[in-house]
Image: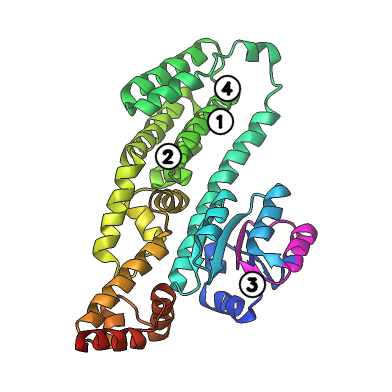
């Protein structure tokens, strides 16, 4: 598996290479580039990377320009932005380009490593689907006349049942379909492969439309075993359907109604904004994909999650300063562990430095 690291700041790439054990994550091919031109050349000359970690601002264009070029050329590379720019416009555009993560450089290195792990899971799911598609294509012409006798896959009907959130009726319908497949003499590996491809596509589509990462289907150890045995017989396929359908129905139910979930997330942030909160932890807590979480939150409140947290923190800091405490105390109580960053953000959001704010408050009280 190949990873490409792109940043015009060499120290950032050196830090990533030295602090993350890439080989233990499964990478045996690395590329470190410092410009968009170098990144494009590596894609063309050495083949696309499975995962790319890149900055946004760079000489000769932006990381968004690079990702747009990757998508336009049909590369399925999973992308993680690592940037100093806490911008809603950038994050929104990144989501449109199917970016896995949008991480600020001030975040802990563990956030980057966890994002890479999630990207690896997405690559794994895509590879499984691709393998299915390839094998299905190879066996497509096995018996043309027999293929005409295959029962029609009832995708529209099953998608509707899935949307109702009731596993029982859908599972019974799947069982009846597999019985029809057997009665038609089409329950060999070729017939089961075709069924599995259509069935898995249905589940993945339903999950992704609700903002849930599709790799949740393979999240437990038993999933891979059941999935691997599914083509052995209709019975084994039914076992896989029972498991995967149960996971899908459960996750769709947990994520049902995006507005209440997003409100729960906002309430959680209101109570924990002084703590270190990563987007990955929030997504896991509420059973949402990180991309969907970011998009849904910003769409509802007009702010990215980091922007919302920063507003809450600066508001808290002002309250602390109003009580007569100093800058260090205000920063600490508001959840900042870097005074310089706190002062910069405070001035950016209020128009004055913390010290100027203290003087103004004192003068107001004395007058």
Secondary structure of residue under mark 1: helix
Q: Which numbered disc, 4 or 2, marks the residue that appears first in the sequence?
A: 4
Mark number, residue 191 = 4
Residue 365 vs 101, above or below: the answer is below
Residue that badge 3 annotates: 7
In this view, the mark in front (4 or 2): 2
Asked whether the beta carbons under mark 4 and mark 2 sit within 8 Å of each other, the answer is: no
Q: CA distance from mark 1 to mark 4?
A: 10 Å
Q: Secondary structure at mark 2?
A: loop
Instruction: Say if the magenta span includes residue 55.
Output: yes
* Marks 1 and 2, the one that precedes in the sequence: 1
Name the residue carrying label 2.
210
Looking at the image, is mark 1 or mark 2 nearer the viewer?
2
Residue with the mark numbered 1: 197
Q: Give coordinates of residue 46: x percent, y percent.
A: 76, 60
Image x and y of residue 336, in percent: 34, 78
Q: CA distance from mark 1 to mark 2?
A: 20 Å
């Amino acid at each position: 598996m190949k990873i490409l690291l792109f940043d015009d700041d060499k120290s950032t790439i050196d830090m990533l290479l030295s602090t993350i054990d890439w080989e233990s994550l499964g990478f045996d091919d690395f590329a470190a580039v410092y410009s968009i031109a170098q990144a494009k050349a590596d894609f063309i000359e050495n083949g696309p990377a499975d995962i790319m970690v890149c900055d946004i601002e760079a000489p000769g264009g932006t990381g968004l320009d690079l990702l747009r070029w990757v998508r336009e050329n049909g590369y399925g590379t999973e992308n993680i932005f690592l940037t100093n720019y806490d911008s809603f416009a950038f994050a929104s555009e990144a989501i449109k380009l199917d970016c896995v993560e949008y991480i600020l450089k001030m975040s802990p290195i563990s956030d980057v490593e966890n994002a890479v792990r999630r990207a690896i899971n997405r690559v794994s799911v895509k590879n499984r689907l691709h393998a299915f598609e390839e094998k299905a294509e190879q066996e497509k012409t096995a018996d043309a006349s027999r293929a005409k006798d295959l029962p029609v896959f009832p995708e529209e009907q099953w998608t509707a049942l899935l949307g109702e959130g009731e596993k029982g009726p859908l599972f019974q319908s799947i069982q009846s379909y597999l019985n029809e497949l057997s009665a038609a003499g089409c329950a060999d590996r070729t017939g089961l492969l075709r069924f599995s491809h259509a069935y898995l596509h249905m589940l993945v589509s339903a999950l992704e439309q609700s903002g849930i990462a599709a790799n949740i289907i393979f999240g437990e150890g038993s999933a891979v075993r059941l999935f691997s045995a599914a083509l052995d017989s209709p019975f084994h396929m039914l076992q896989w359907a029972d498991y995967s359908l149960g996971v899908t129905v459960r996750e769709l139910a947990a994520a049902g109604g995006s507005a209440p979930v997003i409100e729960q997330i906002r309430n959680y942030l209101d109570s924990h904004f002084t703590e270190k909160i990563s987007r990955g932890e929030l997504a896991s807590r509420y059973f949402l994909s990180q991309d969907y979480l970011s998009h849904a939150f910003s769409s509802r409140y007009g702010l990215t999650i980091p922007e919302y947290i920063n507003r809450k923190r600066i508001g808290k800091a002002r309250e602390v300063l109003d009580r007569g405490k100093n800058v260090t105390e205000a920063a600490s109580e508001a959840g900042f562990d870097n005074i310089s960053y706190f002062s910069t953000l405070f001035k950016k959001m209020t128009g004055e430095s913390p010290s100027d704010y203290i003087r103004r408050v004192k003068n107001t009280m004395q007058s």
